[in-house]
């Protein structure tokens, strides 16, 4: 599935799969001011990211706005083979959400 | 019907629901079940102890040398400090990551499925030089490790 905001790679080796994810998101803390207008930029951040492999949830994360802008996360799970699918979904505080799915290499 | 077909149907169904959500435009149809699990009390906490207590159930943690917190000593730019948490503890259920002096210390909580290896890399904002703290819940007990980082440019956190 194509996703504009999620760049994801999953690679299997030695019976493990390593997933690397880069998400395009401003991750605004709500404490930063717009340089021109001096107004606070509204808080806007990803709250939840879940990753599943073959329909089984492998990782569920809760985030606050102090995760860096354009978040990067990497993790490894046991199992997984080339050709199988890994799916990742994020949801932000404004109700935005996106899902991406990649084939394990 | 094979699983692939079922998945497609499921995706179609979820896309349809998504569309309704967009039409409503109010966010009222946001999947509550998903959002409900986000721990607002823990993320709102302004001290490390309260944040750990809310996120992990107790603020009583044991220092553990089995947690490895890999953070550069002088990351300079506090806006994106790479943190790698790994542990040799067995039966890890969840990991919380905190930055001591941030206005809201809790950065994230990671709930590990059965398959997960207890190792996570992520980047966080560090407002000023402070300790980065990892709390690991394994076998219903809490363990922690901390490491000081010096930032030259604060990460507005």
Image (cartoon, helix red, strand yellow):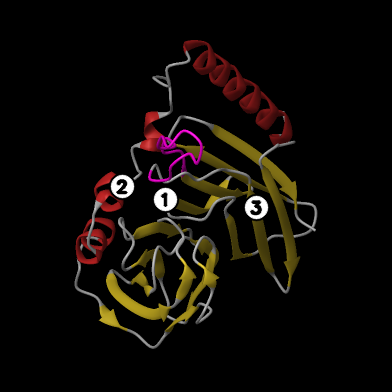
Q: Chain of mark 1?
A: A
In magenta segment, residue A81:
no
Magenta span dominant secondary structure: loop
In this picture, is A93 found above or below B157? above
Q: Chain of mark 2?
A: B
In this picture, is B113 found above or below A37? below
- The mark total stands at 3
- Do the dots labelled 1 and 3 sit on one chain? yes
Question: Residue placed at 40% from the left, 50% from the top?
Answer: A64
Q: Answer whether labels 1 and 3 touch (C-beta < 8 Å).
A: no
Q: Answer whether labels 2 and 1 touch (C-beta < 8 Å).
A: yes
- Residue B118 horizontal side relative to residue B104, left or right: right
Name the disc covering residue A22, or none: 3
Marks 2 and 1, how far apart in space?
8 Å
Name the disc covering residue B39, or none: 2
Marks 2 and 3, how far apart in space?
23 Å
- Residue that badge 1 annotates: A62
């Amino acid at each position: 599935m194509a996703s504009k905001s999620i760049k994801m790679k999953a690679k299997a080796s030695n019976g493990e799969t390593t997933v690397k994810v880069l998400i395009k998101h401003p991750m605004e803390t709500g404490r930063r001011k717009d340089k021109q207008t001096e107004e606070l930029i509204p808080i806007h951040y990803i709250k939840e990211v879940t990753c599943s492999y073959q329909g089984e949830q492998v990782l569920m994360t809760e985030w606050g706005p102090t995760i860096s802008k354009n978040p990067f996360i990497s993790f490894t799970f046991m199992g997984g083979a080339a050709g199988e699918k890994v799916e990742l979904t994020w949801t932000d505080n404004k109700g935005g959400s996106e899902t991406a799915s990649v084939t394990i290499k | 019907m094979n699983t692939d077909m079922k998945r497609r149907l499921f995706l179609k169904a979820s896309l349809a629901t998504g569309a309704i959500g967009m039409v409503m435009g109010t966010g009222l149809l946001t999947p509550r079940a998903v959002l409900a699990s986000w721990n607002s009390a823990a993320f709102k906490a302004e001290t490390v102890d309260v944040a750990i207590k809310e996120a992990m159930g107790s603020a009583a943690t044991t220092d553990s040398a089995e947690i490895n917190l890999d953070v550069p000593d002088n990351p300079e730019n506090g806006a994106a400090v790479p943190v790698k948490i790994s542990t040799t503890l067995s039966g890890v259920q969840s990991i919380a990551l905190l930055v001591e002096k941030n206005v809201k210390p809790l950065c994230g909580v990671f709930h590990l499925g059965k398959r997960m290896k207890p190792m996570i890399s992520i980047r966080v904002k560090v407002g000023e030089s402070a300790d980065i703290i990892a709390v690991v819940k394994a076998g219903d007990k809490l363990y922690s490790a901390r490491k000081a980082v010096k930032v030259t440019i604060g990460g507005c956190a």
